[in-house]
Image: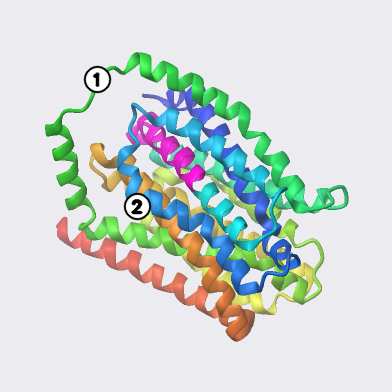
Amino acid sequence: MDEKTLYNKQFMLLCCITFLALCNTAVYFNLHPYLMELGITARHAGFLIGLYSLASMFFYAFGSKWITSSNSYGCMCLGLLILCVCGNSYMLVRESWLIGLIRMGSGFGLFLAMASTMVVLVQLIPPHMTGIGFSVFSVAMLLPYSIMPAVTELASPCIEQPPQLYSLTALLLLPAAGFALFRSRQQRAADGQKKSSTETTHLKKLREKNIRRPTIRGLLWLNGSYFTVFSSQFYLLKGFATHYGIHHPGYFFTIQMGVMIALRLTGSGLFDTVNKACLVQIALFCMAAGFGMLPWATSSLYFFMLAILFGIGMGLCVPPLNALMYQHSVPELRGYNANMMMLAMHFSSFIGPYIGTWLIVGGGYNLYCFAAVCLMLTGIFVVQRLYKKQSNSSR
């Protein structure tokens, strides 16, 4: 396949669906302050935010094997509809336990939508274009986190309560669900075959061997570490800015995501030519430096300048990680391992805001930043160990 086959209609529509689905994650940029306005404590609010990712994590762990190329679009359609219903439910409830149920329902919907997308995606990306393919796809995953915080800031004078914006954003999923339903019908018409029991047993054995491989486990841990700091920063940075009187902190993420998107669009060829393990280490170092300097970023200028450094680090990290997982996976398990990376992402997106909140309550933002630096430096060491062993075993 050549580059033209990567940018086909199906690939671009998957990117659009991913963009809309994740807009319904990024729109909750201001959920933590909103929950506290309802009288929910800071720690409980952090837990409620994390329930979204906890639910997704549970279903990624136990449901990924049931999503296949033959049912992916049907699952995608159902997931998008569930996200739409949950997004509109914030208009009706204020009790914490009901909000918790909404967060868990949204997590289930996100699992169905995104796990199905990943199963289709790995079938579309040519093996020699993994860096470019995952780089372009990751732009669709990043754009919501760049756009929605700024939209939230701009819309706040016109919107009485955040649930109104949550509801409007959720309604954008209806056209995407319609496309997924159309593709699901085509899928059922084209695929009338069922997997044999021999094939199912073979895949089960492959999965058991797969998770015991050090490289697979190491890549999952690295992906989880990245999203631990990414999610905690996304949900908790506004509190840091408010504490120091920095106005319009949502624009921090617009700058950060803008840098990430620019890197992944203009440097997409870089991810297939430069050593991917080296790129991951550079990315982790940039993030460690960013968190190391954040406690002193108490002025608006310094604060927003740091967004550039974070953008470089976070922009470089994910495409080579996903490409390395693709390269180290047997063809039968590429979709499964892609969803295991999503599992690591959602597990970390659950513990990130929760642990981050506890660190801030217990020791302030200095303790939180110190923990993030330690995690990133540990990641650099893990990459070094993994690929040192690999180079030694290949000699």
Question: Residue 43: percent from the left, percent from the top?
Answer: 60, 73
On the image, which quarter does residue 219 sit in? bottom left
Residue extending furthest bottom? 363
Q: Is residue 325 above or below residue 80?
A: below
Q: Residue at x 73, y 39 (%)?
A: 168
Q: Earlier in the sequence, mark 1 or mark 2?
A: 2
Residue extending furthest right? 157
Q: Secondary structure at mark 2?
A: helix
- Write the start and end of the magenta stretch as one range: 108-128
Q: Is residue 275 visible?
A: no
Badge 2: residue crowd in 10 Å (few <14, some 14–19, many ≥20)? some
- Quadrant where the N terminus is found in the figure: top left
Task: Give the residue type that dot 1 points to.
Answer: Gln
**Chosen colour scheme:** rainbow
Residue bearing mark 2: 61
Question: Residue 376: percent from the left, percent from the top?
Answer: 46, 70
Task: Give the residue type that dot 2 points to.
Answer: Ala
Q: Secondary structure at mark 1?
A: loop
Q: Residue at x 55, y 54 (%)?
A: 101
As rendered, which of 187 and 287 lies closer to the eye? 187
Residue bearing mark 1: 193
On screen, residue 275 versus residue 386, left or right, reads right
Q: Is residue 81 above or below residue 290?
A: above
Q: Is residue 34 above or below residue 167?
A: below
Question: Residue 249: percent from the left, percent from the top?
Answer: 75, 62
Badge 1: residue crowd in 10 Å (few <14, some 14–19, many ≥20)? few
Q: Residue at x 52, y 53 (%)?
A: 104
